[in-house]
Image (tube, coloured by chain):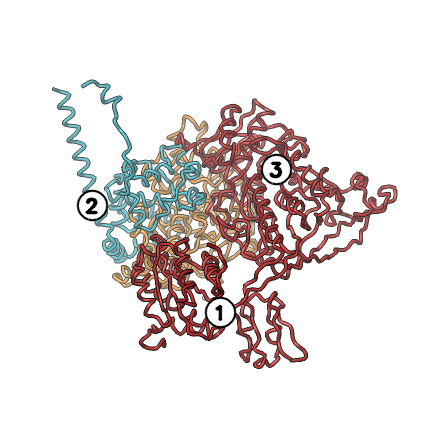
Amino acid sequence: MSDNVEKYIKRKVHKGMSTKISQKFIDAGLEKIRACINCGTCTGSCPSGRRTAYRTRSAIRKALTGDESVLEDIDIWMCSTCYYCYERCPRDIPVTDMIIKLRNIAVEEGFILDSHFTLASDIFYATGHGVPANDPEAHKQWRALRESYGLPPLPPTVHSYPEAVKECQTLMNEVGFRALLDNAAKLKAKRKAEAEKIAKEKTEEEKK
Amino acid sequence: MSEYKWRYAFFLGCVIPNRYPMIERSIRDVFEELGAEILDMPGASCCPAPGVFRAFHIPTWLVIAARNISIAEELGVSPLTGCNGCYGTLRDAWYDLEHNPEEKKHVNELLAKVGRQYKGNFEPKHVVQALYLDMGLDYLKDHIKHKFDDLKVGVHYGCHIVKPSDKRPWHGEYENPQFLDEIVEITGAKSIDYKDKYMCCGAGGAVRTAVKEVAADFTREKLVNMRDAGVDIIINCCPFCHLQLDLGQVEVNNFYKDIIGEPFKIPVIYITQLLGVAMGMDPNRLGLIKNHDLKGVSPFIPIDRFLDIVKEQII
Amino acid sequence: MTETKKEIIVTGKEKPRIGVYVCHCGINIAGVVDVVKLKDYALTLPDVVLAREYKFMCSDNGQSMIKEDIEAGLINRVVVAACSPRMHEPTFRLVCKEAGLNQFLFEQANIREHATWVNMYDPEGAYEIAKDHIRMSVAKARKLLPLEVQKVKVDPSCLIIGGGISGMNSALDLADEGYKVYLVERTPTIGGHMAQLDKTFPTMDCSACILTPKMVDVGRKEKIEIMTYSEVVDVSGYVGNFEVTIMKKPHYVDQEKCTACGSCAENCPITCGNEFDLGMGTRKAIYIPFPQAVPGEYTIDMEKCIKCGICAREDVCEPGAIKYDDKPEYVTVKVGTIIVATGWDLYDPTELGQYGYGRYPNVITGLQMERLLSSFGPVLGKPVRPSDLEAPHSIAFLQCVGSRNFREGGHSYCSRVCCMYATKQARQYKEKHPEAEVYIFYMDIRAFGKGYEEFYESAAENFGISYVRGRIAEVREGENHNIVIRAEDTLLQTPIELEVDLFVLSCGLEAKADADQVASLLSIQRSADGFFMEAHPKLKPVDTLTDGIFVAGVAQGPKDIPDAVAQAKGAASSAAALMAQGEVEIEPYYSVVIEHLCSGCRTCQSLCPFGAIDFDEFKKIAVVNPALCKGCGTCVSACPSGAMVQNHFANFQLNSIINVAVKQPTVENGGK
């Protein structure tokens, strides 16, 4: 097979709309997404879009038309939730909320960055804090810093109340957060294995 | 109890107590000095962060936020936060639950499993909101002892203190808010207008955790604009912006050293640190003078320059 | 076919014989409920002697069915179960009338809007509701009484409120048809917004060149009485017979003596912003709005005047026309019809903080741009930017400012003129400065009128105007007061940043700020967009819901000049049709006094909002003037002795409906 076949021949024609993603917005009461007229106010307002490949309007458009590539794209994680798009949309679409919802759907499908997974599972779920100070070694200096300002080494938060951590974990289990993370981990692992398999097959083919 | 004019439940969040305790100290001290009682919220957790955990799973975000608010409700006062992110979470969750009885019912069913109940009868407030709307500029002015007439300040609002504006107390103003500038200027300092003043610091929305370089590029742009305008210090009202502008400054100096020219070294100061020192409080306790030998702790950009400018006034 | 039928005498005393006609309305009704079952149900109701169903009762065939049944003497009352009476009550009344039956022996059950449309997905529920409506209509039909319509004279005169291009056109047409016209204009001159425009799209006619001759025409017509600097303060009466009070605001200049020589303005020491130029030009405290103003009357702006007395000096005003103690004058006129042509305000973009209007000097509105382009404007048609009075090298226009904006404070509708006026202004600037860069940022270009698409195409092809598909997100001020624009080029899917010398906001049109006061003054309605509401969006576009009052131009909704003129001529035509008839029928729904019950307490007289009740001092009883009574029912509910009866809505008629609303009377239970 000529290299040019892979390089130039794409045969990619959009086969119409799919409601697979947009239905989830509608189920969550966010049917406003359908009112988008693609004016670009959101993208034009976006400080992230001025330095990254993230395009607010395009992400919304892909979600609406069912282009699932939007879920695995890291671009939607480049939104800093500054809310300018939300404030200025002439159709009064809560754009930032739409992006947040889109990320929820991505996580459901197992598209979550390793750093985010660690933060969610190993830090937030485990300690109740997103930025903790309770590690005996790693956080020693932060506790000392607290004391230098006359504050107790650990704040009166979950850090001082182990039962409160349990309470948060109970809630997170009940609301499905643990299951969501576990499922995401599983899907991530599966995708990784598949990708490795394809890569391996390809190298073997090349060897031949 | 009766000598206090106001009472708040202090929602610490994560970054303030665990990375910038001098901000916690300054809020506690300044509020005490202004006649506001600060109550601890035992067992409060991460708010949880609106652009991060909410982006993973909205229902988790909502129920944990409701749990946090319910701790303040037990104390019978409004939760008070010094963090824009926590403010975003507590206020948006409060707003959403008040406008969606079905969701409120569901959240309470979950909370019942840990013996809690969410009522929604106390409005979550930001430190700046308490200062500006509850106490008012005139009240604050009466407590100012030192005026920093030579100080040029780059004010950074951050995002979630003003937006989404329909869930904030600033009458829909989000393009050109002035409240933080006004508080800064009662200290005699001058708020310097700079390009894209209301732009995001870059840290929020899980961006910093995802790709530090992207967050730092936002920060770079802000720092360039502030330096071009000739600011002496940065004043902000959010510990995560604070971290991004402070630690992020070190990162910008590293990632973008080829395009920024001189490395940045602009002191980053939280609003109650500035207010406290203007009110005649001890700069040591406010975290404006380094009084320890700890390594690798905040602030990451030295703030001596601030004291150099104001020392004549505070001596 | 149209031979006069013998009149069927119904006094109301003979036994009712009701015919019920159930309409399928295509699938609008029959697609949801079983119309045959409804027909059978109707037959179970008391006094119903026949029932039929048909595809379209309003069609010729449907109407004939009713006529034939009446003429055959089968029925003496008619119930049609179909659409809203607002739609076809007049149709079926005419059927009765033509068949010789008194038209008020007809009742319409609305089973479309009230049953099948709103309960489209609940056929069983819709069926039950339809039954209820038929049952109630039959109950009322049993109690109907024949009534005679009233006729009132229509005064052959018209009040036109607003002297813009719409009001002027209505006035000219009516005057040419021989009717007396009072043209009331709030500002000191007629001409309206069109006088502010330089050229008009797509033909590029000079606005002043086509407008000023019309203004002069209006001024010359004997039949037209222009009342400028005047406002309508009170309207009473009814169709054909309105009484209107107009306040003529004091000019502080005696218009009889003034020769419009202009010496006063030359000598006036006070210079202030000229409203006509939207603050971009100046005028004196004593002024005429612009040179071609009609009438060319000088006015003193008392808010600006310092009463220095210079203009009153004999050497300045030789005829001695200055009158500092001038007072408002009130005149009352009687007119048969009213045309509302009050026009529009420009959307104020100040609250859209992201566009910097009011904050940055080089951000202006489209109407300000129009004044800059105008050859008799503040810069004589050589546009400059406000910050340095230099001709801009680059201009960006932003479309849909305030329009198509569903946020609070914005307008959801399309203003219909901005795409074309921006294209026109851009072209005009390019004609003068071919080297300039001109951008138009848009969401959609709506070039729908005759010649508009061609105009748009030529603007891009022949004039090189750059159209960028993307709504500008924000602007800030760059160096030298330049405006830096941020947007997305949605077709490139790329954020763009662009620095221009001048930024023009193509603001939309909105209802006049005081439209609510005008609406309550005239008892007319407004639609959700704030503009005055037409009686029917398609079939009665120039009528209001108040008889004898018509609406023209942008007062009814955003329009370009051709559409505004067309509607103005339509309104004039409708008003003329009414006046040409000389008299108009009024529904006989007025109240009548049962003399022996009236105690003469005068409660009704004090409550009547239309002043329709007089007191007979000899008999000591209330007397209703049928021509003034609007049938509102206030007196009926207020009368302590039950002496007031409102025709067609009498208590015994309404009670008959209420009685069956919850009960199901049948022939078996004797109709109880």
Q: Which numbered marker is on residue C9?
A: 1
Label 2 crowd (10 A; few <14 / some 14-19 / many >=20): some
> Tag 2, which secondary structure?
helix
Which residue has dot 3 on it?
C368
Q: Chain of mark 2?
A: A
Question: Is residue C293 shown left or right of residue C584?
Answer: right
Q: Amino acid at mark 3?
A: Gln
Residue C335 position by quadrant = bottom right
Location of residue C636 in the rendering, given as x and y in whole percent from the top left corner:
54, 73
Q: Residue furthest left?
A: A208
> Tag 3, which secondary structure?
helix
Looking at the colours in the rendered structure, which chain would you say is drawn in cyan? A
Residue B98 position by quadrant = bottom left
Label 1 crowd (10 A; few <14 / some 14-19 / many >=20): few
Residue C563 position by quadrant = top right
Q: Amino acid at mark 2?
A: Asn
Whole-Å distance between the Cαs marked 2 and 3?
A: 60 Å
Residue toward you, B110 or C293: C293
**Viewer-side label of 1, 2:** 1
Name the residue rendered at 60%, 70% in the picture.
C608
